[in-house]
C-alpha cells in the first residue's frame, strides 16, 4: 500500500461500530458506551498505543497518526466484546465536492489493481443529498479518474464505503473491516464463575459466550493445563486482564459456593447441579439455545486467537 500523506483535510482514524449498545437508551446506553471505550483503551494500551478515543452518536472513533497505525488499532479494538466491527478509515470534510474530489485519490492504489468496484454510502445524519445520489456521483467520479474500471453491484472486486456524519465523512474499503465478537461490553452485567477442570474448548466457549453477554469472569481452575489455557484466554480476550483466576483442588465446590452466596452466576458448558451446604446450585450453560452462527463464530475466534492444536 502506497503511503498517503496526512493533511488537515484528511486524516486517518478507526471507525468502531458497536453491536447491541445501539438499542439501549439514556444513561444505560451512556454507561455501555463508556465501558466499551474503556475496553478499547485497554487493548490499545496493551500494544503501547495511547490515542484519543471519542464517543459519537452510533460510533466510537479512535484518532491515530498514520494509516498503518489505524490498521493495527482496528485489530486491537475488534478484540473488545461489544464491538461489531472496526475499520481503518479516512476522515474527510463532509461537503459533497470534497468527497468527490478526495475519495478517488485516497483509494487510487487499491482501485487501479481492480477490474470492478461499487460504492456504498449512508447518511448517518441529515444530509441534503440522498445516499443513492452520493453513490452515483462518486461512482462516476471514480470512473472518470480510472477509466479501466467498471461498476459491478453484485460481486465487485473493491467496495468503497462512505459514512456521512454531522461534521465529517468517513471512507474505507470493505476489505479493511475487522470483525468483532459483538454482544455487550465486558463487565457490564455482573460476574460469572466458571470452573475449569480440563481446559477444554467447551469450557472456554462457555466463558467467551457469557463474557459476550457482558459478564465479568471469575475462573476457578485445577491443574497446569487449565491454568495455562485460562491465562491464554485472559490475555487474548479480557481487557486489562480484568478477570479473577483462582486455583482449587475442588473447582466445582468453590464455584458453587460463590454462586450459592449470590456473588456470581455459575456457568458451565453443561447444565449440572451441585449440593453445597444443603443447598442445590444449578449451573447455567450459555451454549444451550445459543444460535449456531454465534457458536461457530466463537469457535473460530477462540481457536485462531489461542493457537491450540489439540482443540
Image (cartoon, rainbow, N blue to C red):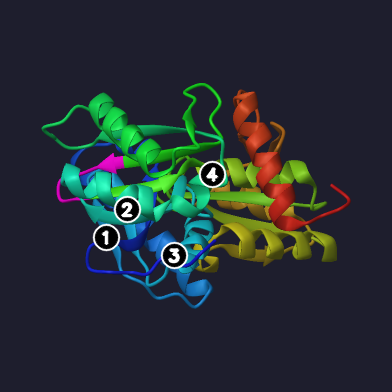
Circles 2, 1 touching at the beta carbon (< 8 Å): yes
Say few, some or many: other residues with alpha carbon within 10 Å of mark 2 (under 14 / 14 to 19 / 20 or more).
Answer: many
Which portion, as a residue range, is magenta? 163-168
Which x, y percent locates residue 40?
43, 61
Instruction: Say whether residue 83 is visible.
Output: no
Which x, y percent locates residue 166?
15, 46
Tell me the quarter of the image containing the N terminus: bottom right
For residue 166, side relative to residue 244 (left or right):
left
Q: Which mark is residue 54?
A: 1
Residue occupying image coordinates x 56% and y 54%: 217
Mark 2 vs mark 4, CA separation in Å:
20 Å
Q: Earlier in the sequence, mark 2 or mark 1?
A: 1
Residue indicated by mark 2: 60
Element carrying mark 4? helix
Element carrying mark 3? helix
> Which residue is most to the right?
310
Front position among marks 3 and 2 = 3
Q: Earlier in the sequence, mark 3 or mark 1?
A: 1
Look at the picture and state if 154 lies above or below 238. above
Residue indicated by mark 3: 67
Q: Earlier in the sequence, mark 2 or mark 4?
A: 2
Q: Earlier in the sequence, mark 1 or mark 4?
A: 1
Q: Earlier in the sequence, mark 3 or mark 4?
A: 3
Q: Which mark is residue 175?
A: 4
Amino acid at each position: 500500500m502506497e503511503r498517503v500523506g496526512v493533511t488537515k483535510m484528511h486524516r486517518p482514524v478507526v471507525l468502531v461500530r458497536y453491536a447491541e449498545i445501539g438499542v439501549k437508551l439514556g444513561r444505560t446506553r451512556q454507561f455501555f458506551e463508556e465501558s466499551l471505550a474503556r475496553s478499547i483503551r485497554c487493548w490499545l494500551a496493551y500494544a503501547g498505543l495511547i490515542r484519543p478515543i471519542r464517543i459519537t452518536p452510533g460510533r466510537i472513533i479512535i484518532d491515530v497518526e498514520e494509516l498503518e497505525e489505524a490498521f493495527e488499532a482496528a485489530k486491537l479494538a475488534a478484540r473488545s466484546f461489544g464491538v461489531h466491527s472496526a475499520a481503518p478509515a479516512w476522515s474527510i470534510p463532509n461537503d459533497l465536492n470534497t468527497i468527490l474530489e478526495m475519495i478517488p485519490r485516497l483509494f487510487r492504489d487499491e482501485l487501479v489493481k481492480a477490474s470492478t468496484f461499487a460504492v456504498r454510502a449512508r447518511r448517518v445524519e441529515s444530509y441534503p443529498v440522498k445516499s443513492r445520489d452520493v453513490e452515483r456521483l462518486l461512482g462516476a467520479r471514480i470512473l472518470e479518474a480510472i477509466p479501466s474500471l467498471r461498476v459491478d453491484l453484485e460481486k465487485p472486486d473493491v467496495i468503497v464505503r462512505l459514512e456521512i456524519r454531522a461534521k465529517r465523512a468517513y471512507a474505507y474499503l470493505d476489505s479493511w473491516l475487522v470483525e468483532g465478537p459483538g454482544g455487550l461490553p465486558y463487565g457490564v452485567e455482573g460476574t460469572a464463575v466458571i470452573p475449569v477442570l480440563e481446559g477444554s474448548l467447551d469450557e472456554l466457549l462457555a466463558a467467551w459466550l457469557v463474557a459476550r453477554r457482558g459478564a465479568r469472569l471469575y475462573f476457578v481452575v485445577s491443574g497446569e493445563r487449565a491454568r495455562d489455557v485460562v491465562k491464554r484466554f485472559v490475555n487474548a480476550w479480557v481487557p486489562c486482564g480484568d478477570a479473577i483466576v483462582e486455583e482449587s483442588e475442588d473447582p466445582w465446590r468453590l464455584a458453587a459456593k460463590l454462586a450459592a452466596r449470590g456473588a456470581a452466576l455459575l456457568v458451565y458448558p453443561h447444565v449440572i447441579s451441585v449440593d453445597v451446604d444443603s443447598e442445590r446450585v444449578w449451573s447455567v450453560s450459555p451454549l444451550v439455545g445459543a444460535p449456531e452462527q454465534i457458536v461457530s463464530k466463537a469457535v473460530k475466534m477462540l481457536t485462531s486467537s489461542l493457537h491450540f492444536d489439540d482443540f
